[in-house]
Image (tube, helix red, strand yellow):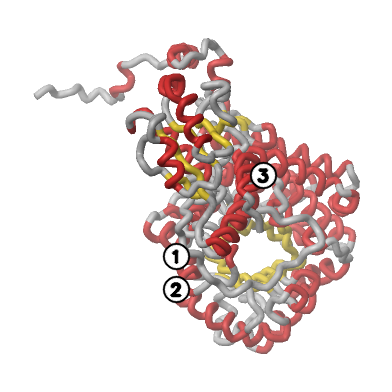
Amino acid sequence: MTVLPDDGLSLAAEFPDATHEQWQRLVEGVLRKSGKDVSGEAAEDALSTKLEDGLTTRPLYTAPETAVETGFPGFAPFIRGGSPAGGAAGGWDVRQRYVGNDAARVNEAVLTDLENGVTSLWLSVGDSCGALPVEALPRALDGVYLDLAPVSLDAGAEYADAARALLRLYAERQVAPAAARASLGADPLGHEARTGEVLELAGAVGLAREAAAHWPGIRALTVDALPYHEAGGSAAEELGLSLATGVAYLRALTEDGAPTGEALGQLEFRYAATADQFLTIAKFRAARRLWARIAEACGAPEAGAQRQHAVTSPVMMTRRDPWVNMLRTTVACMAAGVGGADSVTVLPFDHELGLPDAFARRIARNTSTILLEESHLARVIDPAGGSYYVERLTDELAHAAWEFFRTIEKAGGLAAALRSGLVAERLAATWAERSKRLAKRREPITGVSEFPLLSEKPLDREPAPAGPTGGLPRVRRDEAYEALRARSDAHLAATGHRPRIFLAALGPAAAHTARATFAANLFQAGGIEPVHDPVSVDPATAAGAYAASGADGMAVLCSSDALYEEQAGAVASALRAAGATTVFLAGKPGTAAGAVDEYVFAGCDAVAVLSSVLDRMGVSL
């Protein structure tokens, strides 16, 4: 046995460090083998991914590229967390959301959740949107130890009445002011973004001054960025608009005489956490850095630790195959926790279908519990700190958000930007670009645009109260595909079967499997049932197979380029003779030119193709 010398040197020291240029040369060689003759920066660009906000994910990050001073956890600029211990003391606050106007049912859900891991409550309150009536708040919180369970209110225009009701409840139950922990949820600008209704800031300012004077553990104002996220905004836009909101509230408070430190202490920020884990981590870190800069400019850098509430993104939740939402929310929850969020709300997987059932709420709360107790995610302070990629992405995102914040300020502030249409136009443009990626499946949606399950049984849920409307729109990633699937459902209800397309696979499985799988996925995303029986056809058998398939005038050829050249023309002719009005080819446009009518391929506009096919099949709602 060879004994290595114990000289204190790492074995890695025996190997010279590789340079960035050497790595680039290796990349160039690999790309040349794939037909791309590029070199230097162009080789690196070929492996890069474009993100929203002009950001780019590079294939390699190194230490010299991350020169930003991040400081220490708990100290300005608070990139690494709002407190020195991070979440290591007890993890993040597990905040469950409650909707519905039945106080008894809400109370039952609240007590169950508090007994099983939830640590704070987020209550939707107010008659205007069908939520819990303000006067029913005591019943909904019956049996809750209010000195142990913080309460966050979401009451829209009724925030003042809801706040007074909660404060009265604290007094009636003899909760010491120093022991009360709550977020009263006053957010006039967020309400305007949601509904278009203008609320004066004076009421929110008065509530904040009262909370600061008598309730040291209560924050009166919420900066809710969800309206902008749900309207299709990017991460930088969400951050920029939250800054503009926070600055507007700071101005109103300080103009009323509040010291800057007191004003900063009255704000809580709410952001969306998505299944893009690294972007979410960077967003929460960038948000703290940006708010710390605001506090510094206001002369109170020591009070610049942003209080953050993360909510798993409603935009990413799907109505079809909703079970996949459990995976999305798990990744989003993890990213929010790693990013340093103080409170995290995991929306139930059936959120988009109506009121969640007990099982869905259980899974939602246990998502945080598993990450905290079994994965030990909070036992490391700033887990992402020092990652070259995360640090660079945080810096670039912060700069992009700051530029948009400056745009809003130049327009006269958030209120003016909302009323002029600037915010709506900017978010609509961002969503339009993202919609193109969704339509082309460049941004896949598992269970919807990729690997849909046409035979799934829909979940039945009691309708949830209608949310506020009248302001910015609410978008969903699955909305275009949901419209297509709804047409298919109507056809199924009327005829007993879904619209069908015949998959004419040529040659052996090795030749056609990849493209047959691609075509099946594509058409199922529009609710169109692919019929792949028999497994393979040729010019002699294609007509009979098509006639037996029950297809609605459509067929798609699936095979290799070589077999297309040999058989596509004859098979397409046989299919037309059997009644096919349109013959697609799964492959590059121009293949077997003249033999087929249309092409489907990776990167095609799937929504446009599927909508056109359903139109020609006569399938409508």
Q: Residue at x 59, y 30 (%)?
A: 597
Q: Position of residue 509 (x, y in %)?
A: 33, 33
Query: Which residue is label 1 attached to?
Result: 366
Foreground residue among 513 and 109: 513
Q: Kindly identify which residue carries mark 3.
A: 235
Label 2: which residue?
116
Left or right: 197 with respect to 614? Answer: right
Q: Amino acid at mark 2?
A: Asn
Return the disc, 3 or 1, that comes first in the chain's sequence: 3
Count of marks overlaid on the render = 3
Q: Quadrant of residue 149?
A: bottom right
Using residue 204 as the reference point, say whether residue 444 is left or right of it: left
Q: Which residue is found at the position 28% from the left and 25% from the top?
A: 8
Q: Are marks 1 and 2 in contact (CB under 8 Å)?
A: yes
Q: Amino acid at mark 1?
A: Asn
Looking at the image, residue 504 lies above or below residue 86:
above
Q: Amino acid at mark 3?
A: Ala
* Classed neighbour count for the residue bearing mark 1: other residues with Cα under 10 Å, few (<14), some (14–19), many (≥20): many
Assign a secondary structure to mark 1. Answer: helix
> Label 3 neighbourhood size at 10 Å, few (<14), some (14-19), many (20+)?
many
In terms of secondary structure, where does tag 3 sit? helix
Which of these two is toward me, 449 or 231? 449
Q: CA distance from mark 3 to mark 1?
A: 27 Å
